[in-house]
Image: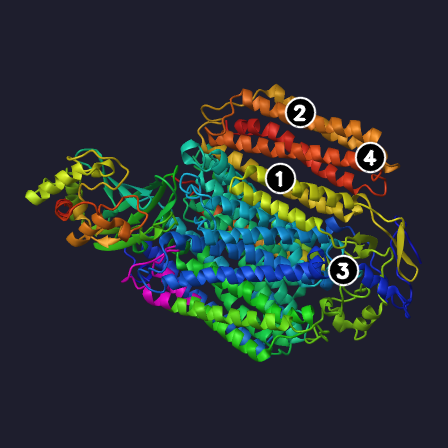
């Protein structure tokens, strides 16, 4: 129940408060109703019948639910208030079965494309613009707030003001096809200084290969058609069919939160993605020889 | 054996018993469609004297009328005697009036308190 | 005192019962002969409600077991993290089919089926008002449902979730036949539901036993009446929605494609406008059953009877405002969603009214702890629990966390299993003696209840936890380390326990039904009339009702009815008959003749099912051959209707005569047609809504690239429709006093039909000339959909004209026997009205959008 016990944003805090009110309230009401039932079973129900049909049936729920409604509407009104400071705007586009993330680079003024992992500065209001490139998905990071669907043809908005640094897991929450189950994401909340540093690094072009193995990996990337789907800024313009890999080495997880980003798993992902996430749009590259796979993994792993 | 029942106008009774709920349905449709149409047409821009928007004014006036009408129906239903041949109908009318008043009042709360359209 | 039609209120004989003893010799034998049940394989041609009802209930129960088996596979897959039992693709088919079969092939059919079986007896009628319609609805459901389920075995089952959201369910993302099977499979359920609604509304309002005023009508009947009315307004939205999605998939008309001006949310609005009332359509019958059960097991009349009736009506209304609470995370705007949230809270009040009325009834009675009582108590706990989680998810911010997680899965299983299945199981224990006289085993019943109640909570309570821990719905597996392992493992154990309880119940039911039939001798001393001993003809005489609890009111009541001292203890015409009474006071009105066994409904149902299924697999020619069979059978069946016997009135009691048959607005078939007209107009309204919704999405109306048709042809078309309607009305004028001749019918009806068809042509031409391109833009597609719907009505109008000409030619259209004309006319006028509306709508919408 992490979003109930450890809400990590302003909005999640409100949702957690409401969640506890509802859980405790519902439990109390269930117990009260069962007490009444037990009294009735033991033929010890006090009062005239009308006290129950009208009193318990109409008056009591009306009073209680009126209070609940007022509480609910006031809290919603608070959540809808525009941010006090200038929000950071991030674009997220849902794909089958990964998340395209776009940040605005203040230095160059361009929008840069990332994938599957967001970073947020603690304490600053963030506005995420959500849409979809194919079917309806839903962006949901429980500890940072509620969910919002990504609907093709619409831009929905989600406001998050993260409170303190940490790492949060999210998962697609609208059934979107074969691999809906393996469409997670991670959100890293940084201190404002760490965030600026991260954004500047992400905005830069791909790290050049540091050694011969990595260089072989870069050549393999170009030779085996990876750029048909994946972009590597400064190396291959690529296309937007698949996640941007310019800084894939900096991410905590791979494959939309499916496996941890470690050298062995990265290699296995390239070689046998269909074994890990069957039905994903990327084919397995089993046919490549071991040395090539090692090189590719080494190259991509150092793209921080 | 008691005498056979006499014919009685059915639709009139049906309408009488359910009228408060039709009022609620009308008000709900008005509120929901009003917001949909009003936001599309830009009526949420404040343009009335006092800084209110035409859409908010529309919602408030409509809600006020609906609540007043619902109260009227409650009062009317209490005036009818609940015994005799029309026993069930009178009681149903009363309860329906009460439930409709509650539902209308509850729908009016967000109409007064929440921002009108998506930014 | 006697009276015939039009001479004022019919009064009873002054002293005693409607009829006296001894009954004339041979009366009972003639009654039995009129209601003969065919034997052997001919039994399948039977149409009376007890036969169809048992088949219907049994078939729905089979679907419960089948869909339950799918769930067990799902639970097995989810028991452990990174499950490998089934592939992602298979799992996605499993959960889609589980939901679809449970909601469409089990839940709605079984509540209709129970009503088909029990309601006429409870109301004192001999049968439902349209036995062949029920038979047709059942067989279409059975053939279509099993064929649809078979797709599981060939990997063609739909896999986009039971609510099939586009674009996932559109052709681009679901290119196979799977989604088409879902769409066309739903068609059967739509037919059955509408037919069921007609039976319920007409049966409850027009065929109650004399003296059963609305105030004396059992709460179960009130619940079914409201359910029937809800079906009339809710199902058309999904009929329209599924039609649009199929047109998108088949013709590439982009209603839901955002790239071409469409909107995926349009589907969600249409689906859930049906979908939310649908769950109350499923729940209200169960609430009605509980209102029947509690007095019987507590031995005291229902407390708050009138309040419960009001509460049922309020639920019926409020449920139509809840649709968007399934869309709380779709981005519609907090104000609009808060209206829906407020309505979702409002619906909790009438629910609470019923619960406390039931508890108060228990409180003043003396409860007998039979198995049905255990299920009743299980229902009270589980449904209140589910209702409370329902209030929780009605709160917008809370739903933003738990929507589309296992918390919601837990919520709806609590209200559906707790709120519907538990009452159903209670009623199986309570009402099974009606079927063969046997009671289920009480000792086994304790085990059944324990396994089911215990298994259910062990299975579904942990899902609340899993959902609050962040586990989304519809995932074929989950990783270890998130804390989801224990809730899932426990759930799986509970699911298998629940299944074992249901299997034990099934075993006991089958065992008891195989025992030889005997009289039930009123095991529960229940107050309502379904417990009066009966045979195929229902009760020997139609009861005269003087109380809300007739069997408790007078100890001699049952004896009187069985010995034939109440109304119509035999058959006047030698055919099957029942009495039509007034809607409010159930005063005697007239006698109606009911049909006996026949093959036409079954063959027509088979043809209908085959038509839709073969179309799905694209065997177009064979499909149309079967469609033709269905149409021919339907016409033959209709040809047999609207026939009155020679006699014009009948004696139903000492000196009390009532007319046989009635025309115009007194006819029960007229009101059935009115219901169909309302369904038709609501489908039309849903399509018009689609047009308006799409129009509002664009910057201009009509959007760039599309144009409105010229005004003149639209006026001409409108005039054509109006003229067609007027000619039809004019044709009927002499029918008030003399039979309609062929020489009158042929020219008038041909002209009227030709005008309607010509009007449609002009309409289509006008749009075509303006460059209507349904594939290019959603706006054009919605116009084309409306035109297609009007075109369908034009085809129906031609069929009506031909049929009526045929009847006139055969001399069957007379002032006394004119239902065929009146009913066709209603639908014809409906089609013309829609034609006029379609002519005007695009311009009206564009004008409003300026």
Q: Chain of mark 4?
A: C
| Residue marked by disc 1 | C625
Instruction: Return the x and y of residue A119 as percentages of the image width and height.
Output: 22, 47
- Label 3 neighbour load within 10 Å: few <14, some 14-19, many 20+: many
Against C420, residue A155 (above or below) is above
Q: Measure the alpha-carbon separation of dots 4 and 1.
A: 28 Å
Dot 2: element: helix
Q: Chain of mark 3?
A: C
Q: Earlier in the sequence, mark 1 or mark 2?
A: 1
- Label 2 neighbour load within 10 Å: few <14, some 14-19, many 20+: some
| Residue marked by disc 3 | C125
Residue C588 is marked as none
Q: Do tags 1 and 3 sit on the same chain?
A: yes
Q: Do tags 4 and 1 sit on the same chain?
A: yes
| Residue at point 80%, 47% (across, down) | C666
User: In the rendered structure, which segment of residues is drawn in magenta?
Assistant: C460-489
Q: Measure the alpha-carbon separation of dots 2 and 4.
A: 25 Å
Viewer-proximal residue among C34 and C75: C34
C134 inside magenta stretch:
no
- Label 4 neighbour load within 10 Å: few <14, some 14-19, many 20+: some
| Residue marked by disc 2 | C758
Say whether residue B48 is visible. no
Q: Measure the alpha-carbon separation of dots 3 and 4.
A: 35 Å
Q: Earlier in the sequence, mark 1 or mark 3?
A: 3
Q: Quadrant of the N terminus of chain C?
A: bottom right
Q: Are marks 3 and 4 in contact (CB under 8 Å)?
A: no
Q: Are marks 2 and 4 in contact (CB under 8 Å)?
A: no
Q: Measure the alpha-carbon separation of dots 1 and 2.
A: 27 Å
Q: Closer to us: mark 4 or mark 1?
A: 1
- Label 1 neighbour load within 10 Å: few <14, some 14-19, many 20+: some
Against C539, residue A140 (above or below) is above
Viewer-proximal residue among A110 and B118: A110
């Amino acid at each position: 129940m992490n979003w109930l016990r450890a809400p990590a944003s302003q909005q999640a805090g409100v949702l957690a408060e409401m969640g506890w009110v509802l859980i405790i309230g519902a439990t109390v009401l269930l117990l009260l109703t069962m007490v009444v039932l037990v009294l009735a079973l033991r033929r010890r129900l006090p009062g005239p019948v009308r006290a129950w049909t009208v009193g318990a049936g109409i008056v009591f729920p009306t009073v209680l639910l009126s209070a609940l409604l007022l509480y609910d509407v006031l809290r919603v009104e608070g959540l809808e208030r525009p941010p006090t400071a200038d929000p950071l705007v991030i674009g997220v586009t849902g794909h089958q079965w990964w998340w395209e993330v776009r940040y605005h680079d203040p230095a160059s003024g361009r929008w840069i494309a990332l994938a599957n992992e967001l970073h947020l500065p603690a304490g600053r209001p963030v506005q995420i613009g959500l849409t979809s490139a194919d079917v309806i998905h839903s962006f949901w990071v429980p500890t940072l707030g509620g969910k919002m669907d990504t609907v093709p043809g619409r831009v929905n908005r989600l406001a998050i003001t993260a409170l303190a640094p940490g790492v949060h897991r999210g998962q697609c929450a609208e059934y979107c096809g074969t691999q809906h189950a393996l469409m997670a994401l991670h959100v890293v909340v940084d201190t404002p200084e760490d965030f600026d540093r991260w954004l500047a690094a992400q905005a830069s072009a791909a790290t050049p290969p540091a050694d011969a193995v990595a260089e072989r990996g870069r050549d393999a990337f170009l030779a085996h058609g990876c750029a048909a789907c994946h972009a590597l800024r400064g190396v291959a313009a690529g296309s937007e069919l698949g996640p941007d890999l310019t800084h894939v080495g900096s991410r905590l997880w791979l494959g939309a939160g499916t496996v941890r980003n470690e050298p062995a798993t990265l290699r296995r992902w390239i070689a046998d993605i269909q074994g890990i996430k069957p039905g994903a749009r990327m084919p397995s590259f089993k046919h490549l020889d071991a040395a090539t796979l090692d090189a590719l993994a080494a190259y991509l792993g150092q793209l921080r | 054996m008691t005498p056979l029942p006499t014919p009685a106008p059915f639709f009139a009774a049906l309408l009488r018993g359910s009228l408060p709920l039709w009022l609620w349905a009308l008000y709900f449709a008005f509120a929901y469609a009003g917001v949909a149409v009003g936001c599309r047409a830009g009526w949420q821009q404040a343009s009335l004297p006092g800084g209110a928007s035409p859409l908010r004014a529309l919602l408030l006036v409509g809600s006020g009328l609906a609540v007043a009408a619902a109260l009227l129906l409650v009062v009317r239903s209490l005036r009818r005697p609940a015994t005799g041949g029309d026993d069930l109908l009178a009681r149903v009318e009363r309860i329906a009036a009460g439930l409709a008043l509650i539902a209308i009042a509850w729908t009016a709360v967000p109409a007064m308190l929440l921002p009108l359209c998506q930014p | 005192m006697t009276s015939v039609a039009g001479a004022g209120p019919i009064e009873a004989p002054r002293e005693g019962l409607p009829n006296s003893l001894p009954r004339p010799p041979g009366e009972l034998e003639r009654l039995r002969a009129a209601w003969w049940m065919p034997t052997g394989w001919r039994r399948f041609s039977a149409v009376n409600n007890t036969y169809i009802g048992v088949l219907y209930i049994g078939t729905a129960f089979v679907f419960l077991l089948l869909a339950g088996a799918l769930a067990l596979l799902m639970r097995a897959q989810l028991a452990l993290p990174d499950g490998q039992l089934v592939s992602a693709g298979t799992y996605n088919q499993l959960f889609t089919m589980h939901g679809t079969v449970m909601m469409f092939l089990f839940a709605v059919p079984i509540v209709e089926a129970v009503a088909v079986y029990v309601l006429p007896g409870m109301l004192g009628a001999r049968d439902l008002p349209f036995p062949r319609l029920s038979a047709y609805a059942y067989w279409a459901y059975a053939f279509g449902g099993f064929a649809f389920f078979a797709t599981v075995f060939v990997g063609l089952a739909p896999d986009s979730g039971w609510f099939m959201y586009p674009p996932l369910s559109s052709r681009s993302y679901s290119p196979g036949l799977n989604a088409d099977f879902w769409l066309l499979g739903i068609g059967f359920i739509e037919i059955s539901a509408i037919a069921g609604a007609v039976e319920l509304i007409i049966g409850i309002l027009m065929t109650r036993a004399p003296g059963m005023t609305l105030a004396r009508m059992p709460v179960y009947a009130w619940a079914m009446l409201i359910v029937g009315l809800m079906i009339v307004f809710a199902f058309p939205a999904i009929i329209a929605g599924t039609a649009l999605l199929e047109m998108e998939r088949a013709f590439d008309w982009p209603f839901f494609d955002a790239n071409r001006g469409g909107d995926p949310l349009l589907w969600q609005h249409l689906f859930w406008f049906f979908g939310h009332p649908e769950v109350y359509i499923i729940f209200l019958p169960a609430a009605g059953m509980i209102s029947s059960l509690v007095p019987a097991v507590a031995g005291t009349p229902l407390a708050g009877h009138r309040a419960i009736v009001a509460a049922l009506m309020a639920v019926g209304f409020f449920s139509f405002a809840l649709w968007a609470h399934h869309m709380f995370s779709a981005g519609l705007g907090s104000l609009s969603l808060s209206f829906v949230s407020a309505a979702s809270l409002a619906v909790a009040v009438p629910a609470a009214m019923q619960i406390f009325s039931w508890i108060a009834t228990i409180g003043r009675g003396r409860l007998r702890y039979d198995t049905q009582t255990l299920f009743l108590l299980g229902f009270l706990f589980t449904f209140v629990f589910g209702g409370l989680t329902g209030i929780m998810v009605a709160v917008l911010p809370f739903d933003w966390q738990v929507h589309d997680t296992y918390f919601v899965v837990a919520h709806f299983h609590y209200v559906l299993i707790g709120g519907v299945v538990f009452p159903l199981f209670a009623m199986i224990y309570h009402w099974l003696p009606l079927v063969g006289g046997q009671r289920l085993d009480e000792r086994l019943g304790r085990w059944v209840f324990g396994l089911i109640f215990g298994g259910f909570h062990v299975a579904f309570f942990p899902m609340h936890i899993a959902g609050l821990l962040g586990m989304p719905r519809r995932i074929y597996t989950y990783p270890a380390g998130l804390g989801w392992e224990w809730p899932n493992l426990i759930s799986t154990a509970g699911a298998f326990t629940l299944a074992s309880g249901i299997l034990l119940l099934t075993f006991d039911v089958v065992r008891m039904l195989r025992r030889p039939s005997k009289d039930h001798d009123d095991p529960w001393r229940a107050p309502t009339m379904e417990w009066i001993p009966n045979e195929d003809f229902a009760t020997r005489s139609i009861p005269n009702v003087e109380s809300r609890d007739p069997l408790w009111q007078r100890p001699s009541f049952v004896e009187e009815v069985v010995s034939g001292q109440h109304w119509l203890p035999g058959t006047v015409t030698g055919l099957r008959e029942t009495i039509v009474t007034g809607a409010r006071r159930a005063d005697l009105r007239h006698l109606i003749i009911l049909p006996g066994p026949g093959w036409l409904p079954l063959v027509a149902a088979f043809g209908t099912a085959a038509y839709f299924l073969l179309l799905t697999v694209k065997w177009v020619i064979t499909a149309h051959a079967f469609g033709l069979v269905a149409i021919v059978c339907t016409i033959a069946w209709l040809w047999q209707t609207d026939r009155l016997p020679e006699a014009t009135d009948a004696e139903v009691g000492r000196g009390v005569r009532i007319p046989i048959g009635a025309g115009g607005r007194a006819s029960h078939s007229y009101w059935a047609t009115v219901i169909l007209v309302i369904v038709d107009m609501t489908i039309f309204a849903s399509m018009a809504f689609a047009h308006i919704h799409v129009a509002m999405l664009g910057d201009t109306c009509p959007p760039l690239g599309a144009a409105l048709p010229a005004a003149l042809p639209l006026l001409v078309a409108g005039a054509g429709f109006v003229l067609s309607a007027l000619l039809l009305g004019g044709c009927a004028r002499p029918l008030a006093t003399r039979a309609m001749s062929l020489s009158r019918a042929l020219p008038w009806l041909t002209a009227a039909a030709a005008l309607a068809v010509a009007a449609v042509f002009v309409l289509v031409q006008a749009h075509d000339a303006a460059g209507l391109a349904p594939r290019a833009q959603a706006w054009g597609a919605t116009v084309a959909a409306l035109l297609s719907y009007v075109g369908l009505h034009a085809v129906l109008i031609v069929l009506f004209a031909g049929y009526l000409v045929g009847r006139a030619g055969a001399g069957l259209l007379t002032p006394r026997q004119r239902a065929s004309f009146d009913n066709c006319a209603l639908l014809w006028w409906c089609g013309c009205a829609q034609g006029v509306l379609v002519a005007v709508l695009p311009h009206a919408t564009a004008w409003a959008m300026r």
